[in-house]
Amino acid sequence: MILLVARQIVHSRWPALVQFVHMSVDSINPVSAIIAELHMAATARFGGNEGKARVCARRAAGWAIRGWRERQGIDQRGQSAHRHLQGTALDRSLPAHVRAAAARLILRVGEDHELPVDADVLDDARVLVDFFLASDDNR
């Protein structure tokens, strides 16, 4: 499996200049892949592509959830990021802010391509990534 990883090549306030590198998923650290995906989400937003930003944010959050579940001994490989987000939104053993962030990430956009609530998909993805990468026993 090939993963497209973004690497910032100019240090600046805006993540506008990005180099894309093809890497095998097996050859990189999953945390690096999650961070790269969040970076691609920010780059897409900066470029005016909120749809791509949403997809990248969901994917990063889903990967973080999957990794945490695997470390908990729950094998759910093959499930989509969306499925991981759905499960997280419904898991009453998780803190309310984590469930709420997951629930906002799975909301459908309307015909106007806007979310039905005021939410920032990047912030929600970061909440989930921070929570699920912080500790294996963070319940």
Image (tube, helix red, strand yellow):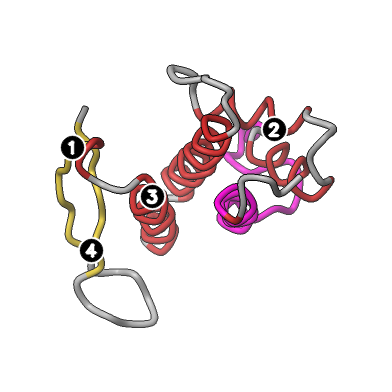
> Circle 4 is placed at which residue position?
18
Q: Earlier in the sequence, mark 1 or mark 2?
A: 1
Q: Is residue 69 magenta?
A: no
The amino acid marked with disc number 4 is: Val
Q: Is residue 37 left or right of residue 19?
A: right
- Counting residues from the N terminus, which is met first, the one under dot 3 or under dot 4? 4
- In terms of depth relative to the viewer, which is nearer, 112 or 99? 99
Amino acid type at image mark 2: Thr
Q: Quadrant of the N terminus?
A: top left
In the image, is residue 53 above or below residue 62? below
Marks 2/3 in contact by CB < 8 Å: the verdict is no
Q: Which residue is mark 1?
A: 24
The mark nearer the N terminus, 2 or 3, is 3
Q: Which residue is mark 3?
A: 37
Q: Residues within 10 Å of mark 2 (few under 14, many from 20)?
A: many
Looking at the rendered image, the disc whose residue lies closer to the viewer, 2 or 3, is 2
Q: Disc 2 marks which residue? A: 88
Q: Is residue 75 left or right of residue 104?
A: left
Query: Looking at the image, which is closer to me, 38 or 138?
Result: 138
**Residue interval drawn in magenta:** 107-133
Q: Earlier in the sequence, mark 1 or mark 4?
A: 4
Residue 25 location, x and y as percent? 25, 37
Q: Judge whether 107 appears above or below 127 on screen.
A: above
- Tell me whether the residue at label 1 lies in contact with that at label 4, contact meaning CB atoms closer than 8 angstroms: no
Residue at the location (70% across, 53% down)? 119
